[in-house]
């Protein structure tokens, strides 16, 4: 167990070092290279040391619990196959780090580069060493994210930005599909553990979800490994710095897809569906990639398409479902990684030295940089599958597999021909690269004069080429054992017979190789002159730019369609929203109610009270009238609303609820007055001509009316049904029985409000307070609309009259008290003390009779309103220091303190205590603690109401300022 | 009853007292007000942690207000679900409060009081066990949030605020109608008491109960932002000042919370023939909301709208998950909810900082550039990277983390939540309904589109500008963002223990017998008189 823990640092160290690298200053390029290099090399050595444990089908496992409930664990698992990949990732990673040290410009902020590179390395190591499939997906997506950052490293280039985004979009799409596929596998198998899944191959293949699983997993693998038609991102990712291309697009990231297909090969492969989908994709990719590669002018573009083609080759091998094909696939993964990485490095050197990667502008470099040229030539030969190099061996194995019979399908029959054709293309583009860059004349317009790069820049490529040679010449002695244990890790102990040697005698594969070589050379001879001047990309296809198509699709789907749908499915206007709300509530209620049939309540008109009915008829007319007039005649609407409110008050009295009636009455009066005061500042609304109403408008109004009638009738029906049926046992019975006994008050409503459900009241007064604060802050910044600045007509007439009589210049600013409401205003002022006493009276009697803190508070506020109305804002505020916000704060604190008082006696919040005390003169007074609570309510209600009043009242002061402002500007 | 028993009510009283106390001070005493407000919120965080421990014992703690036994008085109930909601609210609150101290709290009057009142309302809504009291706290939240939404003024805030208040007042009205009907049929307002009473409702009265529940449900769906009742939400959230929008991230979750709380109580197994009453509709509604939110995310040009539509994505996901009403899906939904709330909160804060780095014209350009190319693509550009200023780098990392969280990419908590939801969706034994498959597909697609939108925005902000404007960001503004993101990362690392807690919470929700028993058996403290007997 302890030994297996070695896998944790193997995966985590790159991330840790990545963070360190990020923290270094941006010019620390040597330090960066050193720490990154040491990390990669250290991991490489560490991995190499683990080989004995993974040899012969062995595996190291280490499990850390993460979210066991979901089957999400961190299981690190390394077998022979993962080991081979780990070696490639760390080994090539090390070489890329050295290479990048010389490639990147001294001005480049390399900390970011190395940090991303290391994090990417860690993600790749995580992918290959995952023993839990979800964990694999986690690291898989991380490779997408870090590759995005790496490709976009030179983000000031538009091409880098676009390439990065495209790569991320496509690979992340694939990652999500993979996640879905893995989730389905987990659903089928009941576990995400790799070993369990690998053991359940037949269960998965037999399951009805097999095809969806297969398709989803394959989309994941194809996007990552740039299989047709998802290959478009790879050529665009070439805008990354070349070390990134060398690493991501040869050895690591693109290999993740084929790695996954191999990993799940025992589970998913071997069915006709697998053969068809994977085979078709592989074959198309192999052929198209090779064909496109011929016509690239950018060296990196050529290499990119060649990579695509080689990945197609690996995929095709995997599709066959034969163990030998799998061995060949693994072998080719390793071979391709080595020669392609070295080729990318060579391409980078050329770019670095010559200043361009365009083959039309390059030529004859052999004489200027012979070492690099030799390296590139050997690597290209490996890419073309020339004997004595590693590429040749795996290609021979591929040919041998292609001619085998695997399935009765046209794909299988076509395989050998496609293989030869694609190989011929590979030969053509390899020669093209070598001949076009290193031979021929040196073009005059080459941007720089190239010479050999520093030794250490060449060293990585040199080492890789050396590997190509050694493996190519002595395959059995070098790679043989490792390949065997890698294949065994996938296939299990039943390994196929195969021999790794250069010479297998004269056989069909050799013939095919020779054929491809000759055809390739001939093809280059034919195309040579055309290619020397042609545009980028193959003929005809070059018009079909993958990137452009992708961008168009992205913009259409993610922008145009989205906008269209948003405006179609949504609205930003209020009216439709309210209409929808009413409609949906109506439909929901009707559907819910009619689900099991609605009984028909009998409407008995016999015991109807005519007076009460008449009263309600008036109320209803008022309410409808208010709604009808609300749009253009606000004042009428308000008066009608007052009428409806009054009817409600009377109803309360009628139904023996004087307390409610009193509260309702006071609230009605005060709110009506406040709204009246506010009405003054609303912008004018001019009634439109009714003659020209279009049919559409009529229909709309009809619909709205139907909706309104429906909602109203529905609510009325529900209310009626509830009221006429026998009520159930309710908690109200308890209140009625216990109000005096336990609550100490005869006024049940008040006892409910301040005791039984005192907490509700407490909440509601808070609401009132907040509303007041909101109204205040809303109106604080409010300036009257221009058409409201003038005083009302009546007032103007009056002022003109006054001005004529005594020439007062202050007419405009004076309050109405001085003008035309002199008598009423005097009375209003005198009423101040009277109302205060009345409020006090209401307050004290609250616990036993109608009244209470709320009503008292509003009554008190009414006193202030009268003062403001009678004497004007200025007059009042010069004489009275009104601090409503303090009153509110104090009210809340008093109410809360009353509730908290109970804590002292060991009771919960708001527990009340009631008794009566004798006061001289007044007599017996109820002194429940609820009274103090009630005082809190009083204080808050008064404060809040007065605050709203002040907020409105101050408009009239601001009005003057607003009115003066434009005139001042006109003068200036 | 010793003082520790009162801890349950403290999350309501503390912000209330603070808010009220702040009213006594003049607006000019900024520092004092800020100190009090921060102190109160910090205490709330501490309380949230303690209460989480308390709740994890498994029994619901009950607080009888006014010493009246349930169902007559009002009760507060603390169980695992309410405790975790309290904690999330307080954590989000402390972050947005700190953020606001940089400048927002001085942009209008009574910011701190309103903020504290909002917290009081939220905490009350999460704690109360009484249907009408829930209404009261909804009103507290509504009025305080309206005040906060208007904070900072400006025509677009007033306009969005009008839509907000109109829709939500209409919803409150429906809430009242629904509660009235349910009370009329069952005769009780206590949630625990309702469980038994609903079973006893005679068949001929069931239609009233169900109509009431449907109307009540619509009110909650407006709060939660279900399509097509959600159009007010993106405008309101994107108009709000950044710290306000951040705390609003938990507001829409209040509707989800109530649905989670009430549907097993009202329509669980004990509800007799009304059991499982509205699941299908809720599920479908959730799916459409998810789709609409995703479309909105894609269609957003301004970053704030993107974030606001993410709220809808989160809501839709949660509604569908609630409708699945399984133990596993509920636990997954809770995890997702916490993660997405914190993420969206952080995103709202971050956006404000990023927009300071923005050339206003760039926003318009980003899409047209994408559509038509920017013309000079073929010109080779210098292949030397650009050094990023530290501020921008830190913001960039935060933005990246936000994007990963929001789109549910591995490895952060967004992924864990989404993964839990996905696996719950297809974990219905052998028969997986079509709706579950839709949910499965939509959830994955929404992640992809969120990523596309975030990448587009990220490229626009960090990569595309030719001239980099380094935004002036104060530490106090950045720390809250980092704090929220670190919380998400912590949730990822601690996903195991978190999931265990939420699993237990989900189990208790779906089997409310323990909850009902704990509430109805809570005895008031005998009065001295009675004790004397």
Image: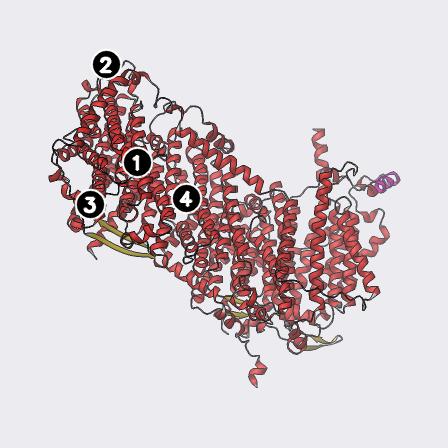
Q: CA distance from mark 3 to mark 1?
A: 28 Å
Same-chain check, marks 3 and 1: yes
Magenta part of the chain: A796-808
Residue B185 versus residue A378 in the image, above or below? below
- Residue, x 51% and y 69% (percent of image)? B6
Looking at the image, residue A495 sits to the left or right of residue A947; the answer is left
Q: List the residue tagged with mark 3.
A: A486
Callouts 3 and 1 close, C-beta under 8 Å? no
Q: Are marks 4 and 3 in contact (CB under 8 Å)?
A: no
Compute the Cα span from label 1 to label 2. 44 Å
**Nearer mark to the viewer, of 1 and 2:** 1
| Marks 1,4: beta carbons within 8 A | no
- Return the chain for callout 1: A
**Secondary structure under badge 3?**
helix
Location of mark 4 (residue): B398
Q: Mark 3: give few (<14), some (14-19) or many (20+) Cα within 10 Å.
A: many
Can residue B300 be seen in the rendering of this structure? no
């Amino acid at each position: 167990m302890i030994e297996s823990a070695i896998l944790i640092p193997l995966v985590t160290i790159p991330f840790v070092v990545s963070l360190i690298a990020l923290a270094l200053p941006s010019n620390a390029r040597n330090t960066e290279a050193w720490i990154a290099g040491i990390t990669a090399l250290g991991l490489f050595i560490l991995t190499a040391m683990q080989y004995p444990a993974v040899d012969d089908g062995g595996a190291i496992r280490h499990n850390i619990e993460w979210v066991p409930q979901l089957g999400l664990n961190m299981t690190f698992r390394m077998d022979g196959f993962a080991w081979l990949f780990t070696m490639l990732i760390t080994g090539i990673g090390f070489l890329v780090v050295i290479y990048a040290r010389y490639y990147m410009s001294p001005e480049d902020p390399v900390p970011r580069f190395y940090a991303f590179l290391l994090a990417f390395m860690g993600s790749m190591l995580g992918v290959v060493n995952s023993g839990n499939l979800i964990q694999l997906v986690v690291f898989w997506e991380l490779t997408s994210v870090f590759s995005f950052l790496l490709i976009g490293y030179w983000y000031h280039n538009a091409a880098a930005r676009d390439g990065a985004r495209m790569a991320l979009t496509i690979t992340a799409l694939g990652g999500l599909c993979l996640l879905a596929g893995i989730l389905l596998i987990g659903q089928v198998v009941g576990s995400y553990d790799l070993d369990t899944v690998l053991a359940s191959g037949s269960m998965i293949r037999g399951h009805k979800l097999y095809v969806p699983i297969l398709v989803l997993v394959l989309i994941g693998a194809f996007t990552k490994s740039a299989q047709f038609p998802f290959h478009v991102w790879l050529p665009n990712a070439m805008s990354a710095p070349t070390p990134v291309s060398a690493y991501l697009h040869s050895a690591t990231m693109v290999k993740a897809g084929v790695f996954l297909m191999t990993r799940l090969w025992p589970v998913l492969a071997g069915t006709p569906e697998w053969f068809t989908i994977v085979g078709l994709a592989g074959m198309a990719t192999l052929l198209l990639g090779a064909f496109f590669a011929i016509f690239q002018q950018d060296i990196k573009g050529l290499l990119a398409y060649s990579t695509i083609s080689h990945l197609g080759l690996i995929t095709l091998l995997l599709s066959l479902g034969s163990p030998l094909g799998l061995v060949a696939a693994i072998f080719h993964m390793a071979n391709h990684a080595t020669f392609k990485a070295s080729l990318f490095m060579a391409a980078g050197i050329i770019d670095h030295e010559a200043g361009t990667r365009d083959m039309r502008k390059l030529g004859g470099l052999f004489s200027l940089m012979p070492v690099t040229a030799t390296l590139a030539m050997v690597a290209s030969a490996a890419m073309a599958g020339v004997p004595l190099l590693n590429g040749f061996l795996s290609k021979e194995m591929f040919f041998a597999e292609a001619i085998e019979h695997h399935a009765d399908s046209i794909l299988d029959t076509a395989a050998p021909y496609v293989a030869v054709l694609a190989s011929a293309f590979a030969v053509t583009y390899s020669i093209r690269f070598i001949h076009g860059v290193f031979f021929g004349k040196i073009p005059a317009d080459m941007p720089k004069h190239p010479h050999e790069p520093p030794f250490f820049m060449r060293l990585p490529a040199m080492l890789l080429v050396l590997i190509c040679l050694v493996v190519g010449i002595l395959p059995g002695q070098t790679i043989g054992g490792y390949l065997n244990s890698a294949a065994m890790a996938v296939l299990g102990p039943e390994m196929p017979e195969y021999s790794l040697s250069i010479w297998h005698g004269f056989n069909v594969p050799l013939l095919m190789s020779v054929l491809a070589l000759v055809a390739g050379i001939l093809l280059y001879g034919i195309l040579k002159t055309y290619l020397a001047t042609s545009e980028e990309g193959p003929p005809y296809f070059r018009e079909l730019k993958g990137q452009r198509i992708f961008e168009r699709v992205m913009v259409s789907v993610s922008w145009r369609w989205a906008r269209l749908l948003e405006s179609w499915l949504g609205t930003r206007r209020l009216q439709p929203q309210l209409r929808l709300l009413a409609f949906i509530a109506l439909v929901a209620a009707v559907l819910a109610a009619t689900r099991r049939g609605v009984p028909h309540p009998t409407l008995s008109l016999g015991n109807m009270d005519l007076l009460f009915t008449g009263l309600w008829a008036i109320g209803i007319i008022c309410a409808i009238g208010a709604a009808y007039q609300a749009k253009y005649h606000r004042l009428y609407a308000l008066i009608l609303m007052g009428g409806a409110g009054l009817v409600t008050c009377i109803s309360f009295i009628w139904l023996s609820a004087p307390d409610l009636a009193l509260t309702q009455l006071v609230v009605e009066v005060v709110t009506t007055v406040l709204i009246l005061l506010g009405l003054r500042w609303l912008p004018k609304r001019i009634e439109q001509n009714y003659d020209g109403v279009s049919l559409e408008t009529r229909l709309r109004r009809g619909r709205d009316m139907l909706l309104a009638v429906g909602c109203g009738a529905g609510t009325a029906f529900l209310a009626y049904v509830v009221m006429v049926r026998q009520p159930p046992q309710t908690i109200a019975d308890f209140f009625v029985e216990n109000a005096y006994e336990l609550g100490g008050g005869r006024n049940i409503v008040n006892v409910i409000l301040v005791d039984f459900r005192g907490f509700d009241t407490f909440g509601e007064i808070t609401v009132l307070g907040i509303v007041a604060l909101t109204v205040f802050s809303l109106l604080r910044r409010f300036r009257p609309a221009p058409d409201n600045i003038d005083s009302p007509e009546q007032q103007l007439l009056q002022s003109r009259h006054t001005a004529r009589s005594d020439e007062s210049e202050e007419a405009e600013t004076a309050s109405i008290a001085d003008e035309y409401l002199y008598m009423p205003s005097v009375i209003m002022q005198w009423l101040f003390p009277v109302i205060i006493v009345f409020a006090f009276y209401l307050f004290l009697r609250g616990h036993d009779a109608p009244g209470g803190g709320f009503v008292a508070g509003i009554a008190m506020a009414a006193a202030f309103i009268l003062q403001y109305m009678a004497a004007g804002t200025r007059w009042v505020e010069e004489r009275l220091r009104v601090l409503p916000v303090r009153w509110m704060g104090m009210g809340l604190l008093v109410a809360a303190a009353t509730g908290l008082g109970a804590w002292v006696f060991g009771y919960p919040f708001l527990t009340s205590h009631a008794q009566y005390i004798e006061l001289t003169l007044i007599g017996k007074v109820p002194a429940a603690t609820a009274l103090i609570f009630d005082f809190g309510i009083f204080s808050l209600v008064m404060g809040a109401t007065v605050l709203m009043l002040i907020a409105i009242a101050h408009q009239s002061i601001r009005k003057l300022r607003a009115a003066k402002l434009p005139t001042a500007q006109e003068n200036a | 009853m010793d003082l520790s028993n009162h801890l349950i009510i403290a999350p309501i009283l503390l912000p209330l007292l603070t808010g009220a106390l702040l009213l006594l001070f003049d607006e000019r005493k900024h520092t004092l007000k800020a100190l009090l407000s921060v102190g109160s919120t910090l205490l709330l965080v501490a309380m949230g942690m303690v209460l989480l421990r308390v709740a994890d014992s498994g029994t619901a703690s009950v607080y009888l207000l006014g010493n009246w036994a349930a169902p007559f008085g009002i009760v507060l109930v603390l169980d695992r679900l309410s405790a975790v909601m309290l904690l999330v609210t307080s954590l989000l609150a402390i972050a947005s409060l700190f953020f606001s101290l940089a400048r927002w709290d001085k942009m209008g009057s009574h910011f701190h009081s309103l903020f504290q009142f909002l917290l009081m309302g939220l905490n009350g809504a999460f704690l109360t066990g009484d249907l009408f009291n829930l209404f009261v706290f909804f009103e507290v939240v509504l009025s305080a949030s309206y005040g906060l939404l208007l904070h900072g003024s400006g025509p677009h805030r007033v306009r969005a605020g009008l839509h907000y208040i109109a829709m939500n007042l209409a919803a409150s009205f429906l809430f009242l109608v629904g509660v009235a009907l349910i009370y009329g049929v069952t005769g009780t307002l206590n949630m625990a008491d309702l469980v038994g009473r609903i079973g006893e409702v005679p068949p001929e009265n069931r239609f009233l109960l169900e109509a009431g529940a449907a109307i009540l449900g619509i009110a909650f769906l407006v709060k939660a932002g279900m399509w097509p009742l959600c159009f007010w939400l993106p405008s309101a959230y994107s108009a709000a000042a950044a710290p306000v929008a951040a705390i609003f991230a938990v507001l829409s979750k209040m509707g989800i919370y109530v649905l989670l709380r009430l549907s097993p109580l009202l329509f669980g197994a004990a509800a007799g023939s009304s059991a499982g009453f509205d699941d299908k509709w809720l599920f479908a509604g959730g799916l459409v909301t998810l789709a609409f939110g995703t479309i909105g995310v894609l269609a957003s040009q301004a970053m704030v709208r993107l974030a606001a539509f993410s709220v809808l994505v989160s809501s839709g996901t949660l509604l569908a998950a609630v409708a699945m009403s399984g133990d596993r899906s509920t636990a997954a939904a809770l995890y997702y909810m916490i993660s997405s709330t914190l993420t969206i909160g952080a995103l709202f804060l971050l956006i404000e900082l990023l927009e300071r780095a923005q050339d206003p014209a760039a926003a318009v350009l980003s899409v047209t550039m994408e559509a038509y190319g920017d013309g000079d693509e073929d010109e080779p550009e210098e292949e030397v990277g650009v050094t990023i200023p530290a501020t921008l780098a830190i913001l960039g990392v935060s933005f990246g983390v936000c994007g990963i969280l929001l789109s549910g990419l591995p490895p952060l908590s967004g992924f864990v939540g989404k993964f839990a939801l996905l696996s719950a969706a297809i974990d219905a034994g052998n028969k997986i309904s079509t709706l579950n498959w839709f949910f499965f597909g939509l959830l994955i697609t929404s992640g992809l589109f969120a990523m596309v939108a975030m990448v587009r925005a990220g490229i626009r902000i960090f990569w595309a500008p030719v001239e980099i404007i380094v935004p002036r960001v104060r530490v106090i503004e950045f720390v809250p963002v980092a704090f929220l993101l670190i919380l998400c990362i912590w949730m990822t690392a601690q996903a195991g223990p978190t999931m265990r807690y939420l699993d237990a919470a989900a189990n208790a929700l779906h089997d409310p017998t323990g909850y009902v028993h704990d509430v109805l058996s809570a005895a008031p403290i005998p009065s001295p008189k009675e004790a004397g007997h």
